[in-house]
Image (cartoon, helix red, strand yellow):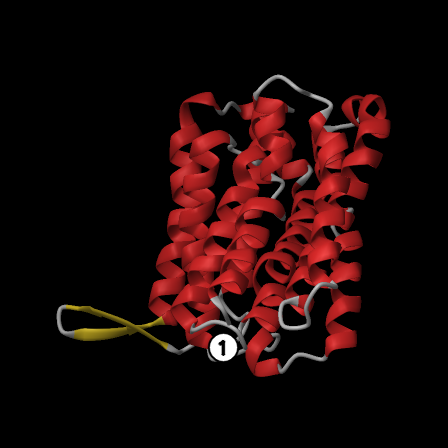
Amino acid sequence: MTRAQTAVLWVAVVGLAPGLPASLAVAAGWAAGRLVLPPIVLAVLLVLAFSGRKLRPVLLVLAATVAGLYAITVVAERLGPWLSSQPIAVGILVVNGAKLVPVALVALVLVVHRPRVEDSALRFGDPRAATGLRVAGRALDWRWTGTAVAVLLVGGPVLASAELLDADGLRAAARWLPVCALAALINSAAEELLFRHGVNAVAAPLLGRTALIALTTAYFGITHLNGTPGGLAGVLLGGGFGLVLAIAVAQTRGFCWNWPLHFVADLVIFSLGVALGG
């Protein structure tokens, strides 16, 4: 790629697709920006996509994601009063289940462009892949590293919230666990396709492995500017977690660890949301 193409790629993935313009507008006090700016971003991505062939698949994947997530924003705005009247777990399932819309749009783009499975890593992969880490002279593979990360994903948030949890909240979390698990299953699969596998599928032929990991890490982190948690903490936590997941994909060449770890993280967050709010 030329330097100009590289710049366009990074600006599109990190500056436009994660909804950064809308987030900054809302932070500046223009609440309507969350509804006004995404269609403009979508139009820019489409113009860039059809201005040259090299970046077209990447830009179309990003445009599909932006279009799908914007549709969710508009519908959620309409359903706001109804969603607020439902149990927290139901709202979580509805909002996260709606991410199947951008998934369908991105899948359509990928079907048309037919990326290599080696690039998308849309396969199980090797759960015993080497990590390059050593402890006490012993090489660690992803069975050890993935398990350790899963323990941290469960233990960290639970310990941080321990003083706020009570018996009623824990009973509510247990009662709504199947709903939270379904929401976590959908959301983790959707976000892994949208922010990792889908981008890898069309950007891998253009970038080296390290640059691709950095790109998807930044994309995932900035997307969580309005996540749970949000703000700078959301970006840093999302980026850090995204880095682990991106490395998992690169080393296992599949979704055998990034998807399960993302599922665990979502299940803990959603269950704690119910326990603390329900």
Determine whether the residue tagged by mark 1 lies in a helix, strand or loop. Answer: loop
Is 45 on the left or on the right of 29, as rendered? right
**Residue type at tag 1:** Arg
Q: Sort mark 1 into few (<14), some (14-19) or many (20+) by Cα contacts within 10 Å.
A: many
Instruction: Locate the C terminus and report the quarter of the image it occupies.
Output: top right
Q: Nearer the viewer, residue 275 or 133?
A: 133
For image coordinates 44% across by 29% down, the residue present is 161
Looking at the image, the residue that sits furthest to the top is 29
Is 229 on the left or on the right of 148, as rendered? right
Residue 254 location, x and y as percent? Answer: 53, 74
For image coordinates 80% across by 22% down, the residue present is 85
**Relative to residue 176, is residue 162 depicted above or below?**
above
**Relative to residue 164, is residue 5 depicted above or below?**
below
Is 79 on the left or on the right of 33, as rendered? right
For image coordinates 56% across by 43% down, the residue present is 223
**Relative to residue 177, is residue 215 depicted above or below?**
below
Name the residue tied to disc 1: 253
Q: Nearer the viewer, residue 5 or 198?
A: 5
Specify whether residue 117 is in view: yes
Residue 57 location, x and y as percent? Answer: 68, 69
For image coordinates 74% across by 41% down, the residue present is 40
Specify whether residue 124 is in view: no
Residue 190 location, x and y as percent? Answer: 67, 56
